[in-house]
Amino acid sequence: MLPGTPLTFDAFYDLVSRYHPVVRQARLIEDGADGDVTAAFGNFEPKFEASWQAKRFGTSPTSTQSLYYNYADVSLKIPTPFGADFKVGYERASGRFINPQFATPNNGLFLAGFSLPLGQRILTDERRTQLSVARALRVVAQAERIAMTNKLLFEAAKSYAEWFSSALQLQVIRDGVRLADVRFNAIAGRVRAGDAAGIDSIEAAAELNRRRAQLQGAEQAYFGASMDLTSYLWDARGQPRDLISGSVPSDSGLGRVVLDSASVPQLLARVLALHPDVRKAEGKATQAGAERSLARQAMIPLASADLYALSPGSGNGFDAGGALNRDGNFKGAINVSSPLLFFKERGKFQSTDAKADGADLQVRETRRDVTLLVRTAINDLSLFEAQLALQRDAVRLFRILSAGEQAKFDAGESNLFLVNTRERQVLDEELKYVALQAKYLASRPALAVAAGAPGRLPELR
């Protein structure tokens, strides 16, 4: 590996996952969804209401004949998750022209009771549906955050793999240039001593120049990979930061990962439970199901019963026992409202039912797609492992051939062209091996992405 200060993949991953703007933007999506859930909970918040109305009209402000009415009403309404609303309150009315419906004793009137749905809205209603939808959309937002972060970390991992590959290629080509330079100097010395033909020095010089040109291309590729990697680096203040001078990639923590075929079913089960695409589909299905339930309830007549116990105001406060006995005072009502043919309600239910069925089908399709992606990623990882083993053996065999050709050349049984050709084959095979290492490195986060994990394979163990 190149000399310098190692920047491991884990350290790079940590920087990206902490400070990259996309990660912060993804968190904001979830924060917004949390706010929607809080707002939906507001439908169940106890509500205090107070009103006061008065009218005084006459020639003498001090005359009681000028007071038309004076009405005060204070109440506390407490919604419940099962549809009923509890209410306690106090009202007091006085004056010459009070509507008898609102008349109260001189000390006012306490009331306590509830409003209960009898038909529509028993199982669900708008506020419960809104809360269910908000919770489902929060699941969708959480999955979206994970998906955005996962995609970013996958791209960052590919960038690190490219940086890692370009560094290894640069090192291989530098070694090749060093060998070609040593050989050129040796051949030039032999030509000057008369022990070799002058054409050999030209062959050695041509090979040296070819490898130097290749080295310039490798250095350019390494610089470009370093700049691409730098684009993922940000600091805690949200400002872009540069790659520290002298930083080089490291293979620390990038060793071979063994995936036991027997653990694949367990991995798939975990993937289907946690994958962001599956969670998004399930969240949307939950949302559609809640809307369908509300639409189904709308096809039931709207009916409710209100019952409030009444107690005259006194120094003893609200007399619950006296208000609730058989002859106690109360205020009650039954309200019924229903369309005759339910055209609007049936149409709404048909629409939401189709949407819910479509969402359920989308869940099944997503789960199937995720399963296939994971199996494909596992297969790719295994194939790259096999290819690496074969390519490693190919490099070993070509090195033997190159060493043999060099020995024949030293014995005068070969020529420099064949020596360079064999050595070039070794360099080409080493570069292929380096490229496969990069593909293998990239296949690990590819499996993590397919599995819905946050960007790196070790967390799947």
Image (spheres, rainbow, N blue to C red):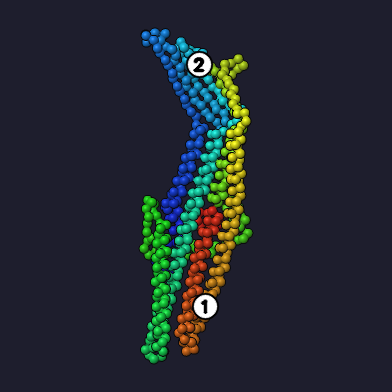
- Residue drawn at (61%, 35%) of the image: 346
Q: Which residue sits at x=45%, y=46%?
A: 28
Label annotation for residue 102: 2
Mark on residue 9?
A: none
Which numbered disc, 2 or 1, marks the residue closer to the eye? 2
- Tell which circle, 2 or 1, labels the residue nearer the N-terminal end: 2
Picture coordinates of residue 123, whole percent (x, y): 60, 33
- For mark 2, give the secondary structure: helix
Q: In this rendering, does residue 293 appear at all?
A: no
How many marks are shown on the rendered structure?
2
Please say if 177 is above or below 92. Answer: below
Amino acid type at image mark 2 = Phe
The reply to whether residue 240 is visible in this rendering is: yes
Q: Please state which amino acid type lies under the numbered disc 1.
A: Phe
Residue ID for mark 1: 398
104 vs 391: above or below: above
Q: Residue furthest bottom?
A: 194
Dividing the picture into quarters, in which one does residue 190 lie? bottom left
302 relative to 183 in the view: left or right = right
